[in-house]
């Protein structure tokens, strides 16, 4: 059924199709029919950052930036849903067109630029939560906030979302906000995480509730940079790391229509690189911090691959666009089989 629906959606402008899909998923959940598509997902709880996930397959940030449809998306069977990226103030993002499908490569290129309605709008949506799974909120800086003052934006967002989030992700790896990725390197990362950790501890005391914080990193790092990031994450006792965001390396889609568009590449071409980053990161972390694996998950085997590389759970984005709800159950079943020592089939 989803194959026919995808053909209709892919006939539309990508961004218009995106908004229509979110509206439809939200409406389906309110009518009580979304959960009918979530059958076959094993009950396989996983502990992550002190939280219990109903199953280890989550939705990556970026699909539901403003928390419009997270209740419906959760009802499709995701064990955890991450909304955002949200910024302190609303911002329009980059000029359109800014979202491109590459169907022959099963890939997406986007240069959205953290377009969102602002953190106050998102909070009002999250207050209407019916989703019983784990809800993450991904935060970032406004495009016009200088990099040296980025910590102020992250901490302001943290303060506002803290009462409503099960975990918070600091996005320092989108390629579509000028200077953002600089926060992953050198003293910039240490300075940011010091401020984030201090804010987390203050909010935990204020609310008498500890909300874990994860950091989302890019795949475009060499081994030395991965080792540095791992050390800083451990030094600041960050609760989790999400690996990886989109890549700026377009070599795998050279010659494809839209293959040279500016922005971050996601989907199947990212699969091998994201898995390699997870493997190297896991070696550097040595179990100190759990990893959420993201990038190129399109079936059960590619989900299990992330777990074998060292991830505790996974998130899906492009695979959900191309495959629909079936990829959730396939990924969950394969990871469950792997955890129980059975053969994984895709």
Image: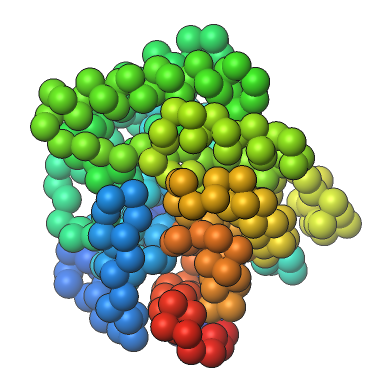
Residue 198 appears at what percent x and percent y?
33, 19
Q: Which residue is pictured at 69% across the width and 56% down the height?
A: 276
State the quadrant of the C terminus.
bottom right
State the quadrant of the N terminus.
bottom left
Res 95 seen here: no
Q: Which residue is pictured at 49% across the width and 35% down the height?
A: 234
Q: How is the image coloured?
A: rainbow
Q: Is residue 51 above or below residue 110?
A: below
Residue 16 appears at what percent x and percent y?
49, 51
Q: Which residue is pictured at 40% across the width and 14% down the height?
A: 152
Q: Is residue 201 above or below residue 144?
A: below
Q: Quadrant of residue 262?
A: top right
Q: Is residue 14 above or below residue 76?
A: above
Q: Is residue 229 left or right of residue 195?
A: right
Q: Please tell me how many numbered marks the rendered image carries.
A: 0
Residue 137 appears at what percent x and percent y?
34, 41
Q: Is residue 44 above or below residue 284?
A: below
Residue 318 appears at what percent x and percent y?
56, 60
Res 249 seen here: yes
Q: Quadrant of residue 202?
A: top left
The residue sitting at the right extreme is 255
Q: Which residue is pictured at 17% across the width and 72% down the height?
A: 32
């Amino acid at each position: 059924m989803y194959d026919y629906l995808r053909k209709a959606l892919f006939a539309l402008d990508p961004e218009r199709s995106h908004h229509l899909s979110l509206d439809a998923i939200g409406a389906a959940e309110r009518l009580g029919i979304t959960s009918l598509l979530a059958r076959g997902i094993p009950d396989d709880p996983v502990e992550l950052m002190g939280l219990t996930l109903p199953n280890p397959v989550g939705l990556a940030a970026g699909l539901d930036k403003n928390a419009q449809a997270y209740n419906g998306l959760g009802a499709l069977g995701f064990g955890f849903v991450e909304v955002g990226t949200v910024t302190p103030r609303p911002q329009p993002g980059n000029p359109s067109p800014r979202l491109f499908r590459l169907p022959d490569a099963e890939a997406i290129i986007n240069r959205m630029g953290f377009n969102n309605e602002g953190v106050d709008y998102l909070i009002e949506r999250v207050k209407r939560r019916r989703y019983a799974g784990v809800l993450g909120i991904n935060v970032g800086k406004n495009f016009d906030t200088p990099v040296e003052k980025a910590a102020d934006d992250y901490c302001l967002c943290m303060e506002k979302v803290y009462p409503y989030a099960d975990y918070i992700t600091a996005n320092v790896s989108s390629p579509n906000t000028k200077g953002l990725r600089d926060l992953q390197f050198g003293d910039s990362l240490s300075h940011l995480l010091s401020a984030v950790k201090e804010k987390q501890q203050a909010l935990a005391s204020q609310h008498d509730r500890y909300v874990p914080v994860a950091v989302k990193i890019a795949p475009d790092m060499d081994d030395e940079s991965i080792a540095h990031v791992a050390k800083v994450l451990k030094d600041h006792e960050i609760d989790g790391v999400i690996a990886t965001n989109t890549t700026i390396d377009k070599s795998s889609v050279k010659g494809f229509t839209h293959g040279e568009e500016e922005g971050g590449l996601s989907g199947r071409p990212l699969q091998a690189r994201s898995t390699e980053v997870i493997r190297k990161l896991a070696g550097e972390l040595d179990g100190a911090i759990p990893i959420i694996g993201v990038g190129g998950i399109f079936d059960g085997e590619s989900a299990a691959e992330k777990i074998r590389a060292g991830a505790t759970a996974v998130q899906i984005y492009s695979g959900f666009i191309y495959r629909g709800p079936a990829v959730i159950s396939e990924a969950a079943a394969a990871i469950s089989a792997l955890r129980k020592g059975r053969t994984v089939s895709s």
